[in-house]
Image (cartoon, coloured by chain):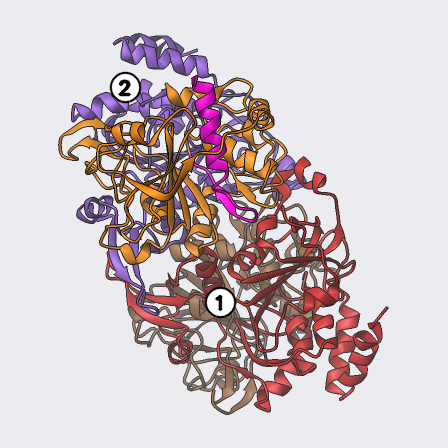
Chain colours: A brown, B orange, C purple, D red
Amino acid sequence: MNRTAIADQMIYAMSREIQDNDTVLHGISSPLPILAMSLARRTHAPDMAYVSGAEGVDPDIDRIYLSSFDPRQNRNAVGYFGLQEAFDLAQQGRLKVMFLGAAQIDRHGNTNLTVIGSIEKPKVQLPGGAASAFLMPITPKVVIWTTRHSNRTFVEEVDFVTGQGYNHRSEEQMKNEMTIVSNLGVMNFRNPDRVMQIQSYHPGHSIEEIREKTGFELRVADDVSETAAPGPEIIDLIRSMDPDEIRVSEFG
Amino acid sequence: MNRTAIADQMIYAMSREIQDNDTVLHGISSPLPILAMSLARRTHAPDMAYVSGAEGVDPDIDRIYLSSFDPRQNRNAVGYFGLQEAFDLAQQGRLKVMFLGAAQIDRHGNTNLTVIGSIEKPKVQLPGGAASAFLMPITPKVVIWTTRHSNRTFVEEVDFVTGQGYNHRSEEQMKNEMTIVSNLGVMNFRNPDRVMQIQSYHPGHSIEEIREKTGFELRVADDVSETAAPGPEIIDLIRSMDPDEIRVSEFG
Amino acid sequence: MKKVLSSLSDAAKLVKDGDVVTTGGASFNRAPMELLRELIRQGRRELVLIDREPAIDFDILIGAGCVARVRAGLLAFELLGFAPNFRKKTESGEVITKEGACQPIMTGFRAAAMGIPSLTVRGMLGSDLLAITETLGSQREVEDPFTGEKLIAVRAIEPDVAIIHVHEADEHGNSRIEGPHYEDVTKAKAAKTVIVTAEKIVATDEFRKNPAATSIPHFLVDAVVEAPDGAYPCSCFNRYDVDYDHIREYIAAVNNDRFGEYLDEHVYKRIGA
Amino acid sequence: MKKVLSSLSDAAKLVKDGDVVTTGGASFNRAPMELLRELIRQGRRELVLIDREPAIDFDILIGAGCVARVRAGLLAFELLGFAPNFRKKTESGEVITKEGACQPIMTGFRAAAMGIPSLTVRGMLGSDLLAITETLGSQREVEDPFTGEKLIAVRAIEPDVAIIHVHEADEHGNSRIEGPHYEDVTKAKAAKTVIVTAEKIVATDEFRKNPAATSIPHFLVDAVVEAPDGAYPCSCFNRYDVDYDHIREYIAAVNNDRFGEYLDEHVYKRIGA
């Protein structure tokens, strides 16, 4: 698959994590979430509430930009809702779905967006965790997306816990459901041990490939299957929302 | 003096409590404060910031109404600023002057707006303390106004402490200056004991009359004098801001 | 966006007996009177009313026997005097009121709107109100964890229902308020259920044309009702002013033991109208 | 209303060496670039920069040697990659950054804007960031006084200076922002000193005609400067878009050790212009 096709597959899988009536937020550097949210709203979730990182409520996306806060992405919004307000919704438990990134993720769902190496002597100073530390424990559905499924991303142990996973000291807070959508498949933690398992592999990929490119022993869900592929009308829809193919930049 | 003249005298005295550059707020049922603020802004304090209980910033007052929150009183405001925001300013120490009412007040400046009689068995259930409990300890200048100077208002001990005076347990918070403007004179607490004293008596009234109509031993400031009377241009200005003589309703 | 357009009658049914209710507006301005009249017609009972500075909105519900308790910073008719039903029924003990400070009420709403269980304020420390609210469990003295400063923690107030009258809304609940907003947006965020009444229901495109004018976004709203003159006799800024004469009539009715007639005339006779 | 109209040069002098500074906007949008360029020209040093999600605004100050420390939720150039000066100077240890979570920074501003010493948040509890911030004294675990729930208390952030770029302002500092406001109003309330740069200075009457459009009232503003294109190369909604090509040039300059040339070309050569 070329990068556009992988992007479209991921966007489609991510959109299916949204249910109708959900209130959904995206953050910074988030072309795939923006397109997934907009796709969901135009297909199976017309009643969802879309809150944009650029502060628009339910905008019509017909073009996206290199900044996910670019205010042009608020076209036709019905109102503004600030990030501070959206975070209040999250504290109330009303923000149902959030999309978050990760430079590293481990089998328990801990994510690192802070530093590669140690915090005292960084090998790579990452840009910062943004909303992860705050939202991961309190958001009912967290969708982590990564375009780089490899054993450098899916690691035995994260160098730094930016966003907490299921094995952490405050696990009483972790009543959420976490899904990971990568360029290879969809993973989740729907087992009694709350450890990562393959839920589906994207067309053209396999359980074996995913396990091989994962830095720890990855379980397989009992009902594992191939990820549903986007049909041509979905692909057309995505294309219409991102004519400049900004979504491919995430695979840079 | 007729009631209009007394109102004008009080408004003038109240306006002189405002200094240029002060940020000033009025609350509910406050025709005299509204007119005092507006008068100050049009005379000696053009740079003050006027925040109205109706949420307008620096409105031009040309008519007032029976509700001090009547939005018509925001004519020509340069913006809106909510009461919640104004109270934040107060917590920051940036709200310099607040006008507050009182059904009872004692020699230490404790005010009662809650109940006559006991809270368990009220003789008169008063409307409630509004901002007094909150603002009295933290606002640099509190101006209490009352149109009913009698020993039922100026009492030996208030039935209930709604707004704290200088003798209270949290006196470390009471770094403010409190002035009382009544229909008879101007009182303050500028002495080492922080007890009420007459600073000035309005024209036509006297120290003796004020002391007689006060339910406790009222001190007299060393530099006591007659209150400065509003000149004709001031009276015209007040009249132009309140052509319906709403200010007289406070003497009901 | 979900459609939440409703009838006055159905929207009012979202308020249950015993609910904790707050109303939009302040004093005689933009109170959701039409919806409150419907609550009276439907015979709602035992409500707990909370607001900073309400007026005739609370007083009419109290007079109609809908109310068990009131929490307000101040409840009066401004220069027109005491809130007449409130005064009668609190002095008779039929309605209970214990507080009387604006900041804790606004702060309680704000804490709920922010999704945290409590929020601190400065001030308040020397007031006798504090002892009362500490007994009620709505406030208590705390120390700031960083500075050690003594503050008052105010418990979040999450009303069962907020009823808010606005200028324009669409069928999804997107709402525009003109002029002073008071704490209405905070209340819409704080409450479990939000009922909006609007002078006019307009097309969603009107909101899309000027999103900066949207005060309350659709996803906070559970029901929206078209209610022209819905704040009457209170004001609705830019639409109509307070009818002070009507309010004087109301006061006279209560004070002359003719409040039943007032309700017949201004509330009940509207059934089916 | 006081007049606070100022020149770019005089306004920039309100920022002192070592000050804690925050900037308006978010990412590549409505950053107060012109005022920041003036700070570079004036040779400001040892600044402590705080913001939720800054980008080239912080990076250019870092690159020009003005910055000692950074507190940010995230500092990057979005899809264009790392913030190049930030990455270089943090990895070399020249600039110190320790945090990396948006909510505590927004909450710190909000606490200061509310005039309270700290404010609690939910979430955060399992993050390693917490131990770092506890050491720094900016966050700590607490229990809610009513519910006992474990929360994180965030210490108020009161910047010495907030620098905010707006669409229109008057000579008193009344300011209008179009489109997304980000945390700019909160920052204006939180900071000790507020500098506003505006695309255009307009008459106060423009504000009186539409008070609902006023974002920041005059009494929060200490200096206002007319700065057309003052956010460039960032966007100013409804006026101009981000110049992504310019930002690519900037990144290339840093990465090819030509940042000095970039500054000569885009910052220093403007002296006296």
Mark 1 = which residue? D105
Horizontal side, residue A4 vs residue D161: left or right: right
Image quarter (top left, top right, bottom left or bottom right) of the N terminus of chain D: top right
Image quarter (top left, top right, bottom left or bottom right) of the C terminus of chain D: bottom right
In this rendering, the count of numbered labels is 2
User: Can you give x and y, in whole percent of width and height, for residue A9 in the image?
Assistant: 60, 66
C85 and D224: which one is in front? D224
Q: Secondary structure at mark 2?
A: loop
Tell me what residue is drawn at x 43 percent, y 17 percent.
B2
Q: CA distance from mark 1 to mark 2?
A: 48 Å
Mark 2 = which residue? C64
Tell me what residue is drawn at x 56 percent, y 63 percent.
A27
- Kindly identify the amino acid type of the residue bearing the numbered disc 2: Ala
C144 and C208: which one is in front? C144
Query: Magenta stretch containing residue B7, yes or no?
Result: yes
A14 and B245: which one is in front? B245
* Among the 4 quarters of the image, the one containing residue C206: top right
Q: Is residue C194 visible?
A: yes
User: Can you give x and y, in whole percent of width and height, for residue A230 in the image?
Assistant: 60, 61
User: Can you give x and y, in whole percent of width and height, for residue C142 in the image?
Assistant: 26, 60
Horizontal side, residue B32 vs residue A75: left or right: left
Horizontal side, residue A119 vs residue D151: left or right: right
Which residues are drawn in magenta? Answer: B1-27
- Kindly identify the amino acid type of the residue bearing the numbered disc 1: Ile
A51 and B239: which one is in front? B239
Query: Magenta stretch containing residue A234, yes or no?
Result: no
Chain of the residue under the numbered disc 1 shown in the image: D
Would you call the spot at circle 1 few (<14 residues within 10 Å), some (14-19), or many (20 or more)?
many
User: Can you give x and y, in whole percent of width and height, for residue A121 in the image?
Assistant: 50, 92
Chain of the residue under the numbered disc 2 shown in the image: C
Q: Is residue B127 above or below residue D169?
A: above
